[in-house]
Image: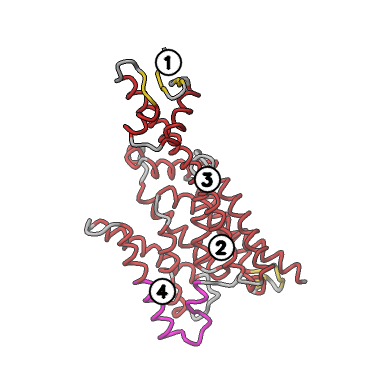
Amino acid sequence: MIYLIQLQIIIIALLVTIACVIPGNFLVLRGVALMSDAISHAILPGIVIMFLCVGTLNSPLLIIGASLAGLLTVITTEALMQTQCIKKDTALGLVYPFFFSIGVLLISACARNVHLDTDMVLLGELAFAPFNRLICFGYDIGPVALWTMIIIIISNASCAWLFYKELIISTFDPILAHMQHIRPSYLYYGLMMLTAITTVAAFDAVGSIVVVALMICPPAIAYVLCNSIHQMIWLSLSIGCYATLIGYIGAWYADVSIAGSIATAQGLVLFIVILLAPQQGIIARMRINQKLRTQHALDCIVLYLQEQPFKKVNIAYLSHQLRWSKNHALTIIAHGVTQGKLMSDNDTLYLPN
């Protein structure tokens, strides 16, 4: 029985990852990844208000209320930006704490005796997800979170497939989108609505912090590694699921929070990729910059020699004139000799004929 529960936890975690990564790719491409964090906090008042209306936490109307609250967050943020008084990051920093604080006040004032609190919203507990069962016509057909996330995945994947071209065009060239009678604003708000629905569907299982990590980290990892959007989407799905499995295994052996371990694993994979990526990684960029500095120094030596009457110069005198250490000068000269741009004879450096 315990192995079946573990299997269900893993499946739910993977489904949540897939559901979050699909809209997350377009959020990262549009440069609005922080909007997922804003929505994940701002949905709280929508959930509380809808709960106060229907009186139960199991009603699907809570998803509608949360989605409307998320959409209202986006609209309010865009309205503040349109004033041109503040930038997007400032608008987000003003709007989502405001909505989240309203939700906290509503919980403390009207829902103190209900299992709906800020810890549940922020942290979640994936280990409890298999125990919330879906009963259909008297039959237990599995955890509610499992079927909910399957529906969300189908919805997100269908929207991404149907509007793939429109999403790409409106992301990179809004002017071209208008010329082709595509409404970028409609697509933007539709994407935010999908993000809000995905967030509220997943937060009960894993919490909003993990939802944000899953929406940002795998797409960001794939963005560093890929030059094709199509490859980026598939790679982000693969890496996201892989990191989720690593996080679950780490949580199992360390006996810590599964959701927290998954978010940590996503962040660690992102850090490793940013450090070791073959083209865009920190180490690769350091090597490229080092090569550029060496090439620039070599060009300086060549230009200096071209200005000399006999195209020759003493190496010690050269390093003194350029204010280089002798070791650094010898390194650059060796590089120039290897490329055939310089020649040396004892302590004399000269240009090849």
Q: In this view, does 158 lie above or below 83?
A: above
Q: Is residue 138 above or below residue 36?
A: below
Location of residue 333 in the rendering, given as x and y in whole percent from the top left corner = 44, 28
- What residue would you read off at disc 2? 264
Task: Look at the numbered disc 4 and give the secondary structure of its residue.
Answer: helix
Q: How crowded is mark 1: few (under 14 residues within 10 Å), some or many (20 or more)?
A: few
Which badge, 4 or 3, comes first in the chain's sequence?
Answer: 4
Residue 117, magenta (yes or no): yes
Task: Look at the numbered disc 1 and give the secondary structure of its residue.
Answer: loop
Residue 203, magenta (yes or no): no
Q: Which residue is drawn at 48% across and 28% down?
A: 334
- What residue would you read off at disc 3? 161
Figure colour scheme: secondary structure
Query: Gap in Å between the C-alphas at discs 4 and 1?
Result: 76 Å
Which badge, 1 or 2, comes first in the chain's sequence?
Answer: 2
- What residue would you read off at disc 4? 45
The quarter of the picture where the N terminus appears is: bottom right
Q: Which mark's residue is nearer the viewer, 1 or 2?
A: 1
Query: Gap in Å between the C-alphas at discs 1 and 2?
Result: 57 Å
At label 4, which amino acid type do we have? Pro
At label 2, which amino acid type do we have? Thr
Q: Which mark's residue is nearer the viewer, 4 or 2?
A: 2
Q: In the drawing, what numbered circle is on residue 190?
A: none
Q: Do the residues labelled 4 and 1 touch (CB within 8 Å)?
A: no
- What residue would you read off at disc 1? 352
**Magenta span:** 98-122
Which badge, 1 or 3, comes first in the chain's sequence?
Answer: 3
Judged from this view, the residue extending furthest toward the top is 353
At label 1, which amino acid type do we have? Pro
The quarter of the picture where the C terminus appears is: top left
